[in-house]
Amino acid sequence: MEQILGPAVPSTRAVLRPIGIRDVVITGGPLARWQRINHEASVPLGLEQMERSGVLPNLRRAAGEGEGPFQGYRFQDSDLYKQLEAISWEHARAPEPRYAEFIDEAAAVLARAQRPDGYLNSHYQVVKPDKIYAELEYSHEMYCAGHLFQAAVAAARAGVGDNLLAVARRFADHLVAVFLTGGNDGIDGHAEVETALVELYRLTGERTYLELAGKLLDNRGKGLIMDSGMGMLYAQDHVPVREADTAVGHAVRQLYLESGIVDVYLETGDESLLECSVRRWEDLVATKTYITGGHGSRHDGEAFGERYELPPDRAYSESCAAIASIHWNWRLLLATGHGRHADLIERTLYNAFAASTSADGIRFFYVNPLQRRNDLVEDAYLGRRREWFACACCPPNIMRLVASLGGYLATETDTGLQLHQYVPGTLAGGGARLRVDTDYPWDGLIRVTVEEAPAGEWELALRIPSWSESTSVNGRLANPGADGYFRIRRPWTSGDTVELQLDMTPRLMHPHHRIDAVRGSAALQRGPLVYCFEQADQPEGVEVDDLAIAPGAEPRAITVPELDGVGRTALLEIDAVAVDQPRDGLPYTAKPSATTARATATAVPYFQWDNRDGGAMRVWIPLA
Amino acid sequence: MEQILGPAVPSTRAVLRPIGIRDVVITGGPLARWQRINHEASVPLGLEQMERSGVLPNLRRAAGEGEGPFQGYRFQDSDLYKQLEAISWEHARAPEPRYAEFIDEAAAVLARAQRPDGYLNSHYQVVKPDKIYAELEYSHEMYCAGHLFQAAVAAARAGVGDNLLAVARRFADHLVAVFLTGGNDGIDGHAEVETALVELYRLTGERTYLELAGKLLDNRGKGLIMDSGMGMLYAQDHVPVREADTAVGHAVRQLYLESGIVDVYLETGDESLLECSVRRWEDLVATKTYITGGHGSRHDGEAFGERYELPPDRAYSESCAAIASIHWNWRLLLATGHGRHADLIERTLYNAFAASTSADGIRFFYVNPLQRRNDLVEDAYLGRRREWFACACCPPNIMRLVASLGGYLATETDTGLQLHQYVPGTLAGGGARLRVDTDYPWDGLIRVTVEEAPAGEWELALRIPSWSESTSVNGRLANPGADGYFRIRRPWTSGDTVELQLDMTPRLMHPHHRIDAVRGSAALQRGPLVYCFEQADQPEGVEVDDLAIAPGAEPRAITVPELDGVGRTALLEIDAVAVDQPRDGLPYTAKPSATTARATATAVPYFQWDNRDGGAMRVWIPLA
């Protein structure tokens, strides 16, 4: 099959085709900053942690080369696989000999640890060799395998790590022998291997990988695995995937599962898979999605929770769930061509996802709440970003997405190119070469210069974000089609430009009345950026916990120099009041006795929060 | 020491003295109903479960008499102890030979299971004999011992179960030998034994029990136990009890601990203990208490959560926490004489606690939310009351409190009697005998007849609940003292009556502005009863999830016959609107497009909810 250097490259049913990471150069804006920080700070930290957190030592133990106890969780291997995937994409984007070396060295350890039959999992080989495939409800064996396959695919597309691909294929062949042709009907409690098997199929052409992915999807929801103790919804094993109407249980599991479902559709054309995934997507977006794009409302079970259960303070909104959502929406975009998926990718990318990493790239959030109260007691541990985690699923996951961001910006068809995300730089696809000049998302003007285009009619499609209430193209009001794109189909001459002006008016956003947890409150949004109020930006003596928007007030953009610890930003301010109410006895009274004082409240983009002090923060602010 | 037949009978420092269960006869109202249902339905079910859920079989295994694996949790023994306590109080209140027989039989099994050195715990004896006292952070060994002591104390005060007391004393002596004089500085991860040891001291006069309770309190917060994996706050081992400013972690643990703290103060006079407990009480009431009196805002860790974190839908508000709060407040009331503790007992009793049991007494809530959405998916399991639980701490705990309710209504001093709760019936104390006639809490008129009083001046103190905005006594406006009581001190003649008229105007209650989760909403309260809106009572086609109170509307009392499945009640209605808003795409919009239609909403007392269908319910209803 044709190989494109990027994540998720379907071969047959896609309405849109990805363009490769090397065909995109990001030259500025937040994405360039994130990639630079990822390269300079996050990835080096991640590589260090592969030794420090026990990941490579565990594998050496499995290879019979080390001493000492197994360290960490049973899915510890997956940290390495995500780290390998991250540096594979990074090597494609900004080659470094040390990345290729690290991949080769790790692949060698993996090859030595791998059993002759292809099985590979340091936890089960070292700690529980008698329980291999016997605890699939929580073993994460196929989950880890999936991350290995994704790493191997990324490395192969980047032209490194042949040895890694050999390890991956041996393990994949073992899974096929056991679970496809060997009569074992088990599935993994944590979905992930399904989408990875399809990618490995796309790379290798080995059809049994696709068949196994399909079988694993078919077997889910039949109770073929035991209850891990978290209930059958936790692992989406309560009802077959084609019948489930709503996303439930562990959010990351559901979202990885959805990528696998759309991937199998993309290669087999099984419409029932696309249908069920789109059905759940529509329900999820309308009832279980934070304004930041985040998913997962509960710490308990890391679960979605009920429809409209979207607490800001106890939002789980795991960084991995934001990543999984971007993966899924990318596949839905390729499968349907509908801009609503690119809209959600944008919202998630600039808010829930971007907030996961500190401005300096060396601290990460696992959980991304939309509110932090002052004086945390119970949440003191989770309240701030941390360098690493005992369960470190998020940091290397963040690194692999940042490294591969170039793959999610645009697509091509036989007759044109679709711009989904607006980032300054150049890109080539659909036979054309474009330059994009913009200060987005700080500013709404995007100038696209066609540097090269095929002869004859050719189509440039520009996504008009649903938040842009009044959009112009080349100075004229432009309404997008039902799919969210404004299309220009004509012959092009080198140097032709298109000026897209998006509506960057800052706005108060109001929640649906069923979202009880933020009733009577509004959030500030400007362009794709959701804002929050941090204690550090408020007037002396005004507590974020007591702020309310003054009646009729509207947000105003204010210009600031670079903000210390945050960097380039765009602040908003709004007329507000500070509420004062006695704290004595029960906090429920027939006659409330609050008083208020005028204040001006200042908001910073949510993704830039927690880069100053550990003070209070809130996205949703009460309306006085 | 003088023995009073009731729970928690301090001997030295109490400002108020309890009066015994047998000195109180409850003849009507909800409490009589709860006691009747407890006697007829709940207790028989509980006794059956002692076999069915494995509790007695486990103990027979420990006695070397049974076969089969250990069943249930490591604290399974405690179910039996709470059940024994329940039937001990019940035997005092309404004697039944089968109760005494059950106690004797169970005591015999316990005696046979008990090791010669006094240690007794079926889980550790059967499953982990090498781990005795080696896993105190989660073993519950002393927690179980505490419940055994409480059962033995109750039985002894009720005049049954000598054999049970002997078992309890042997175990208590063993704890003393290990943890007081034996050099082991361990404490139990789950507080409970502290208050129980003090009660056992009160019964037996054995001072080492009190000393051990004091030592366990002194040792808490020094990190002497391991982190059970839930963090040090979970078991209140993060800071010494005298220094902690706020209730944290597992709510039931904190609340049982507080009872132990006040109990040790009551017997030793260590003011630093009373002070720290009162300090946490004031903080807890102002910032971490539901309007139902419930405690515990999180499923995750069964924890309190942060100040003002009081979500209605995901309230944990465990039934056991309501019971523990009543225990603690009773002790604070005895220690301080302040009516605010009786106020909170009333609120908790008629709302958070009473809601735990179905009208027919055979189903129980573990978790008591203040909101249930329609179409539950993730919460389908927890959504309705259940007959029993794998972790069945709540049902027998409920039974022991209901059986002992007579002990919490009134107190005496040398010069008078204090009426804390208004229940029709008779009571004797402070040298007097009273009859109370009332239809409380359905009606606010309470007539107290002094049937017998000591010669000379004698004082009757009547608690004026803080919710009663306008109260009269014998027809004249009556303002309570700072401690919440209206006192009548004079000579009395047999047949003298006092008529107390409480203000039963139904009212909209508004939350403190920092309680984000119910902002823009109000709750209905009438007298001590908090109300809720259940789907079953609303007009056809109006969903509880879409209800909002019409601007300016006030609740009205409406008269209804007995409600099917619920029994005697008093409903409220209020003018409302039904909100309709599209459910399409993200639920956040710059221009909300909701429409409303008029409706009349009907509310039922919260404690009577979930006795019809499994529909939606909410205590807090939005203000349109």
Image (cartoon, coloured by chain):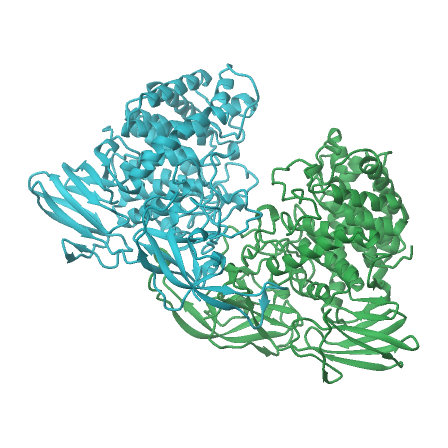
Chain colours: A green, B cyan
Q: Is residue B463 visible?
A: yes
Q: Residue at x 93, y 77 (%)?
A: A455
Q: Is residue B205 visible?
A: no
**Residue A541, placed above or below residue B287:** below
Q: Position of residue A31 (x, y in %)?
A: 74, 67
**Residue B297 horizontal side relative to residue B351, left or right:** right
Q: Position of residue A446 (x, y in %)?
A: 75, 77
**Residue B504 horizontal side relative to residue A128, left or right:** left
Instruction: State the residue lying farthest toward the right.
Output: A455
**Residue B306, placed above or below residue B75:** below
**Residue A164, placed above or below residue A361:** above
**Residue B400, placed above or below residue B382:** above
In which quadrant of the rendered view does residue B156 lie?
Answer: top left
Q: How many marks?
A: 0
Quadrant including the N terminus of chain A? bottom right
**Residue A457 horizontal side relative to residue B203, left or right:** right
Q: Residue at x 33, y 31 (%)?
A: B199
Q: Position of residue B263 (x, y in %)?
A: 33, 37
Q: Position of residue B580 (x, y in %)?
A: 52, 65
Nearest the eye: B572 or A400: B572
Q: Residue at x 26, y 52 (%)?
A: B465
Instruction: State the residue lying farthest toward the top.
Output: B65
**Residue A87 horizontal side relative to residue B395, left or right:** right
In which quadrant of the rendered view does residue A94 lie?
Answer: bottom right
Quadrant including the C terminus of chain A? bottom left
Nearest the eye: B266 or B5: B5
In which quadrant of the rendered view does residue B564 lie?
Answer: top left
Nearest the eye: A456 or B455: A456
